[in-house]
Each structure stands twice: as structure tokens, then as C-alpha cells.
Image (cartoon, rainbow, N blue to C red):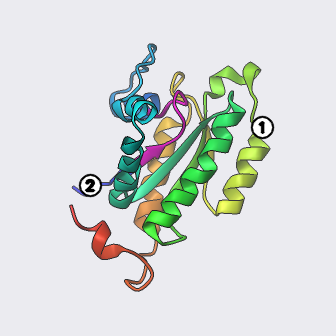
Amino acid sequence: MREYKVVVLGSGGVGKSALTVQFVTGTFIEKYDPTIEDFYRKEIEQFASMRDLYIRNGQGFILVYSLVNQQSFQDIKPMRDQIIRVKRYQQVPVVLVGNKVDLEGEREVSPSEGQALAEDWGCPFMETSAKSKTMVDELFTEIVRQMDFSPLPDRSEACCATCNLQ
């Protein structure tokens, strides 16, 4: 069975862990408990460099923002820039995700804003809800599809030798 290395990135509290746990176990985490990387990134800046390592080893990327938090939408833009910088390749498999569609009444980021950014990046866009399991399976199916059909970069274009070290 093939193993896929998917990296889920986004600001704290956008639902990265909730989406992943919902996909893997079919359950929703009601109580928010920040993951270690989120917690330490606030405490000690050197842990932010761990993100480079995750990106270097990742094959596909899910960039998540909370559609009830405009700042989280702004925060993902430099994260994509970091992916391109670390991978040194523009056509990295990415899916842009607006999470928390179950909180429609509190929306701060319109679907057209997310769609426009995804079009600019040339990647798929989805709105999900880890809580109601809306589009969660489809999200992970799409990133796997992106990884399966993404052309591999020429060795001269990217850090393939480095990325394959584990």
C-alpha cells in the first residue's frame, strides 16, 4: 500500500487537527487542545523551523483557514510562499481549504475570496466542516489525487535528492 505524506498547515485554531482526526477516525474533537507544534511555536521561535522540515518531507499540502477568521485567511499566504521556497518548485500539490462552514452565520471570508486565491495559486478550493464532516473525505481524496497526478520536477528544478532523505 502506498504511503502519502500530507502536511496540514494553517493558523492556530482553524481546525487542522479536527479535520485530520475526523478523516482518520470519523470523530470530531469538541475540546480544542493545541498540538505541540502550535504550542511551542508561540513559546520558542526555533520550533518554527520545524515547519521547514515538515514541508521538505511532505508530498502534498492542505492549507487551512477558518472562514470565520479573516486573519487566518491572510496567514496562509506566507505559508504557501514558504512551501514554494522550501520545495523550490511551483507545482507542488496543494488544496486550499476554508474550514468551519457549519458556522455560516459568523463568516468573515467569502467563498469568492477563497476561490480567487485558489485560482491565483492554480489549486483546488474547498469549504469544509470537521464538526459536521462536510467535504472532509473529499478533501483528503483530492489531495491524494493531486499527489498521484502531479508531475515530478526535473532534478535540476527542485530539491528531490534532499526531499527523499528520511
Prevailing secondary structure of the magenta residues? loop
Give SS at disc 1: loop
On the rendered structure, is 123 left or right of 62? right
Give the x, y percent position of residue 80. Answer: 56, 55
Q: Reply above or below: 86 against 152.
A: above
Which image quarter: residue 111? top right
Question: Dot 2, how many residues are within 10 Å of its Cα: few (below 14), some (14-19), or many (20+)?
Answer: few
Give the x, y percent position of residue 164. Answer: 26, 68
| Chain part drawn in magenta | 7-16
Q: Is residue 13 magenta?
A: yes
**How far apart are labels 2 and 1 at the CA level?**
34 Å
Q: Amino acid at mark 2?
A: Glu
According to the image, label 2 marks what residue? 3
Asked whether disc 2 touches disc 1, contact meaning CB atoms under 8 Å apart, the reply is no
Residue at the image position 62 percent from the left and 43 percent from the top? 75
Residue at the image position 38 percent from the left and 32 percent from the top? 40
Which image quarter: residue 34? top left
Give the x, y percent position of residue 4. Answer: 32, 54
Give the x, y percent position of residue 35. Answer: 37, 29
Question: Residue 32, labelled with which disc?
Answer: none
> Which of the two labelled residues, at mark 2 and mark 1, occupies the earlier sequence position?
2
Viewer-side residue, 29 vs 163: 163
Question: Residue reaching furthest top?
Answer: 31
Question: Residue 110, labelled with which disc?
Answer: 1
Q: Quadrant of the C terminus?
A: bottom left
Give SS at disc 2: loop
Residue at the image position 48 percent from the left and 44 percent from the top? 9
